[in-house]
Amino acid sequence: MNWFVIVLILLAIIGSMMWMMPSPRQRLQALLRQSAMRSGFQVQITRILLPRALGEATADARDCVAYRLPRVRPSGHSRQIPWQVFKLVSHANQGLAEGWSWAKGEGELDPEALEIVAELLRDLPGDVYGLESTPVSASVYWEERGTPETVALIHQLLTRLLAAGI
């Protein structure tokens, strides 16, 4: 009977320790976030309001991870136009790649900038579901289902966006 109690206590202790250990998914997220921060990203958990999709009466809110790449120096443009696009189908999709819709900034970008944004959307990894540009940074919202190489690709694409002054 004493051995049974000792084994039960040991199993309880080991179980508690295993419960506190990060899962493989959490380890991957930590690796991606560390890689992103080393590349210059600011990683932020935030809540976004998605635009209304076709056939929906209300917009959805979503908790997500934003990888933000700060603008190093002020844009040469006199006025930086903030905009947001998300991967969903709605009426607000002028000039974007198929399956993407505007949440903010539709009709504000010139045709050259719009072409750069559309090309960038085609090149983004498949689990990116949002792209944003503000006077302070360019951001992606994604599921973090990649590798450090995916983070490097996102960094390259956002750097191209910032270099274009969009």
Image (tube, rainbow, N blue to C red):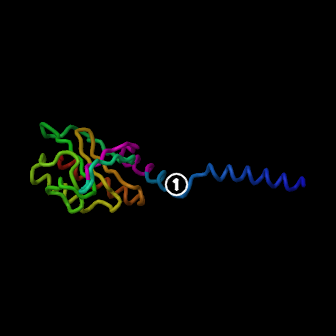
How packed mark 1 is, by other alpha carbons closer than 10 Å (few <14, some 14-19, many 20 or more), is few
The question of residue 22 being in magenta is answered with: no
Left or right: residue 22 compared with residue 76? right
Q: Which residue is mark 1?
A: 27
Please tell me whether residue 104 is drawn above or below residue 8 in the rendered image.
Answer: above
Asked whether residue 154 is in view, the answer is yes
- Which element is circle 1 on? helix
User: Which segment did they paint magenta?
Assistant: 33-52
Please tell me whether residue 73 is drawn above or below residue 110 in the rendered image.
Answer: above
Question: Residue 158: horizontal and vertical position, in percent?
Answer: 27, 51
Question: Residue 76: horizontal and vertical position, in percent?
Answer: 14, 40
Q: Looking at numbered disc 1 in the image, what kind of residue is underneath it? A: Arg
Residue 83: quadrant of the picture: top left
Q: Nearer the viewer, residue 127 or 63?
A: 63
Q: Nearer the viewer, residue 108 or 116?
A: 108
The question of residue 37 being in magenta is answered with: yes
Question: Residue 104: horizontal and vertical position, in percent?
Answer: 21, 45
Asked whether residue 158 is in view, the answer is no
Residue located at (24% from left, 51% from top) = 85
